[in-house]
Image (cartoon, rainbow, N blue to C red):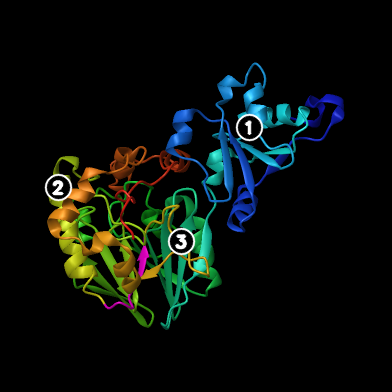
């Protein structure tokens, strides 16, 4: 829409950058959102927060004008942000609201633009290395960068943010030596091959993950339980922790345990994304992994997971980690018996991630979508955790 399309030469509707909206939410500012996607799309995935007031009114119901019940549901004395899937429909609705006298803007790029936000936070840990956490607010996906003495490793990178990792490695005066995945992801397209294509980094997969039938067009190395990789002056210890998948593997650097999708700071893994028919057996395996490999670590161990949900509470520095001691005290599921654990985990699992079968096939190397198609595949919530209800006390 151009200025000539607007009546009386008025200015265009304000386009609100996703990062700006995110900062407003993170700062605790009261935010009012009108989401004009379908009810189904809204229920599956939307912007949330304790300080976010949401109204969902599908766009197709607004084509003949703004109904009175919608106008009455919107605040007259606060800015309203209208959003849709990609940013086009929201601008039209925002224009109609402005004509009604509302203070309104629309989210640039819609939920697709929201999915491009990526945050970098360095962890405050007592180790001779820089460890950074990346967070994608739209899905809660977390990735990590470990830098020591000019060497670097990226753990669980997302293909869509390859440029971010390479930029940060350069800024930290290092070269990327390893690109590791903790397992075959089902909620996002892995970036280990994309990162390696633009650097001299070695692609690393857990041996049990590769055994699922990886078909990469480039060389990669595998690691097993008990192996060690060296990055500068630090070592990355390998702990096989199956359950979420057969290949699920944690990596430990000093006091930091990168748990992948095995253990989160507000939940534990779901066991049904690799073989839904074997979820019960996988839940037993997950219990064994947590008991023998994870909970056997010292209380001071810092759990750094691959996801954080909206219910997860960030630390003062904005990072999403917790000590194992804290999780023992706050997460009921970690003190359950095996039978109770299995029954609880398999009884109330959330919907599977959108397009998870295609994402798994892509991460195995069996499908090769281009960058844009890959980005479209992973839009939406990750849903890789078990139900959060009653997990914590």
Q: Which residue is at the front of the view, 252 or 161?
A: 252
Q: Name the residue under label 1.
A: 73
Q: Say left or right for 261 vs 208.
A: right
Q: Say left or right for 363 vs 135.
A: left
> Mark 3, residues whose alpha carbon is within 10 Å: few (<14), some, or many (≥20)?
some
**Residue 313, which numbered label?**
3
Q: Residue 393's image quarter? A: bottom left
Q: Which residue lies furthest to the right in this view?
A: 8
Q: Earlier in the sequence, mark 1 or mark 2?
A: 1
Q: Mark 2 points at which residue?
A: 280
> Mark 1, residues whose alpha carbon is within 10 Å: few (<14), some, or many (≥20)?
few
Q: Residue 125's image quarter? A: bottom left
Q: Label 2's element?
A: helix
Identify whether 151 is placed above or below 68.
below
Give the foreground label among 1 and 2: 1
Q: Quadrant of the N terminus?
A: top right
Identify whether 305 is placed above or below 146.
above
Residue 255's x, y, as percent?
34, 78
Q: Can residue 222 be seen in this view?
A: no
Q: What segment carries the magenta color?
A: 298-305
């Amino acid at each position: 829409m151009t200025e000539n399309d607007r009546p009386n030469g008025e200015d265009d509707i304000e386009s609100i950058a996703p990062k700006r909206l995110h900062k407003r939410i993170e700062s605790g500012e009261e935010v009012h959102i009108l989401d004009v996607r379908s009810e189904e799309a809204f229920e599956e995935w939307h912007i949330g927060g304790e300080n976010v007031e949401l109204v969902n009114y599908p766009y197709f119901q607004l084509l003949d004008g703004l109904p009175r019940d919608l106008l009455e549901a919107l605040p007259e004395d606060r800015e309203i942000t209208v959003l849709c899937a990609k940013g086009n429909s929201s601008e039209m609705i925002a224009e109609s609201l402005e004509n009604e006298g509302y203070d309104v803007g629309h989210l640039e790029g819609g939920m697709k633009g929201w999915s491009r936000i990526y945050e970098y936070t360095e962890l405050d840990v007592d180790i001779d290395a820089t460890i950074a956490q990346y967070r994608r607010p739209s899905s809660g996906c977390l990735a990590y960068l470990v830098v020591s003495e000019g060497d670097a490793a990226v753990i669980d990178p997302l293909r869509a943010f390859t440029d971010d990792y390479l930029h940060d490695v350069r800024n930290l005066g290092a070269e990327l030596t390893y690109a590791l995945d903790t397992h075959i992801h089902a909620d996002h397209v892995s970036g280990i091959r994309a990162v390696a294509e633009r650097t001299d980094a070695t692609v690393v997969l857990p041996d049990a993950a590769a055994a699922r039938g990886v078909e990469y067009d480039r060389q990669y190395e595998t690691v097993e339980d008990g192996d060690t990789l060296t990055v500068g002056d630090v070592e990355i210890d390998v702990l096989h922790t199956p359950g979420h998948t057969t290949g699920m593997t944690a990596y430990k650097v000093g006091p930091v345990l990168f748990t992948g999708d095995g253990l989160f700071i507000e939940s534990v893994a779901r066991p049904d994304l690799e073989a839904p028919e074997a979820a019960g057996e996988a839940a037993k395996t997950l219990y064994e992994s947590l008991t023998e490999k994870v909970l056997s670590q010292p209380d001071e161990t810092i759990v750094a997971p691959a996801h954080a949900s909206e219910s997860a509470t960030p630390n003062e520095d904005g990072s999403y980690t917790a000590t194992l001691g804290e999780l023992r005290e706050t997460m009921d599921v970690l003190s359950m018996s095996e039978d109770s654990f299995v029954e609880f985990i398999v009884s109330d699992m959330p919907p599977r991630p959108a397009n998870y079968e295609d994402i798994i096939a892509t991460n195995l190397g069996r499908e090769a979508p281009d960058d844009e198609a890959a980005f479209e595949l992973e839009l939406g919530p990750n849903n890789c955790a078990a139900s959060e209800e009653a997990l914590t006390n």
